[in-house]
Image (cartoon, helix red, strand yellow):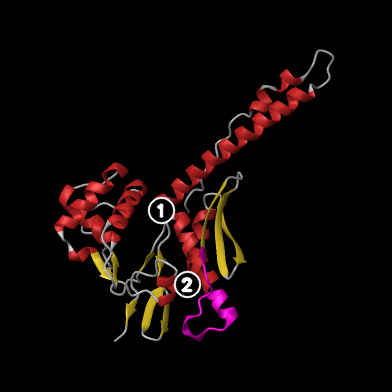
Amino acid sequence: MEPKTQIQKTESPLTSAAALIQQADGKIDVDKLGALLAVQERWEAIQAKKAYVVAMAKFKENPPEILKDQTVSFGQTSYKHASLHNVTTKINTELSKHGLTASWVTSQDNGSIKVTCKITHIQGHSEETSLSAPPDDSGKKNNIQAIGSTVTYLQRYTLKSLTGLAEHDQDDDGQGAVSKPPGVPKPTDEEQKVIDVICERLPQIKGKRINNKKVASILFSFWAKYPAEMSAVGATAEWLVKKDKPEMYMPDNRSQFEIDNDLPGDEDSKEQG
């Protein structure tokens, strides 16, 4: 059994400064007490944020593997994705080992559905991210089903976004799909941000979309490292355009709902002939 994240205890400034608020006659100086409590609240918030960062770092040292366990088919489109139950069970189980838990808040405004995912640490600090989209009326869904489909979709993507996790294909032969050749490291979070911005600068081709993983692979194969500074974005994008690498693009086979709302879709979605 893996050890849970240990929370380091630090002496509160309220404890060390308690004597300062007591006057000579033994009464409490209310003004000093108020100022000291404000300092205490700021100190606790800083300690809680530090604890959150440490816990998330521990979580990412051994992240759960999320397999695509559900197939969706409608019209000419078919794709696989991880079910919400699969995503939440795997991620929340691992988060809880580090004093973290995830929750969602859903709201509607002018026909748009907004889902906010929040991850909270037991010391009180939380971080959140939100996504919005209209009801998914694809596949002849009724109104309630259309809303439920969008809520489920956004819950899945906000949780994965906040934890930085991705789904994987199920391993059919014991070998698994290898996304990178041996010796090619995974980009750090900061490097991935730079790569994503570079991909946004590349020319768009109708019916296709940028394959961010392939772009990263091309960059590493030439430079033996990933770009890590935003100042390199412009020059790197220009360099890629001049290289004229068609493998940087892949067919854009997202559902019409995902295209219309600029949603990422699932990497293995495909058009059936």
Specify the amino acid type for callout 1. Answer: Asn
- Res. 19 in view: yes
Mark 2 and mark 1: Cα distance apart in space: 21 Å
Mark 1 crowd level (few <14, some 14–19, many ≥20, 10 Å Cα): few
On residue 15, which mark appears?
Answer: none
Measured from the top left, where is residue 199 in percent x and y?
A: 29, 57
- When the figure is inspected, residue 187 is found, relative to residue 74, above or below; the finding is above
Specify the amino acid type for callout 2. Answer: Ser
- Res. 229 in view: no
**74 or 86, which lies in front?**
74
Horizontally, is 255 left or right of 117 in the view? left
Q: Residue furthest top?
A: 24
Mark 2 crowd level (few <14, some 14–19, many ≥20, 10 Å Cα): some
- Residue where numbered disc 2 is placed: 83
Horizontally, is 270 left or right of 145 in the view? left
Measured from the top left, where is residue 232 in percent x and y?
A: 26, 44
Residue at image x 18%, y 51%? 239
Horizontally, is 240 left or right of 21 in the view? left
Q: Secondary structure at mark 2?
A: loop
- Which tag, 2 or 1, sits closer to the chain's start? 1
Measured from the top left, where is residue 225 in percent x and y?
A: 22, 47
- The answer to whether residue 133 is magenta is yes
**Discs 2, 1 touching: Cβ within 8 Å:** no
- Residue where numbered disc 1 is placed: 62
Measured from the top left, where is residue 87 in percent x and y?
A: 48, 66
Residue at image x 56%, y 67%? 113
Q: Which residues, given as a range, are shown in magenta?
A: 132-149
Horizontally, is 40 left or right of 183 in the view? right
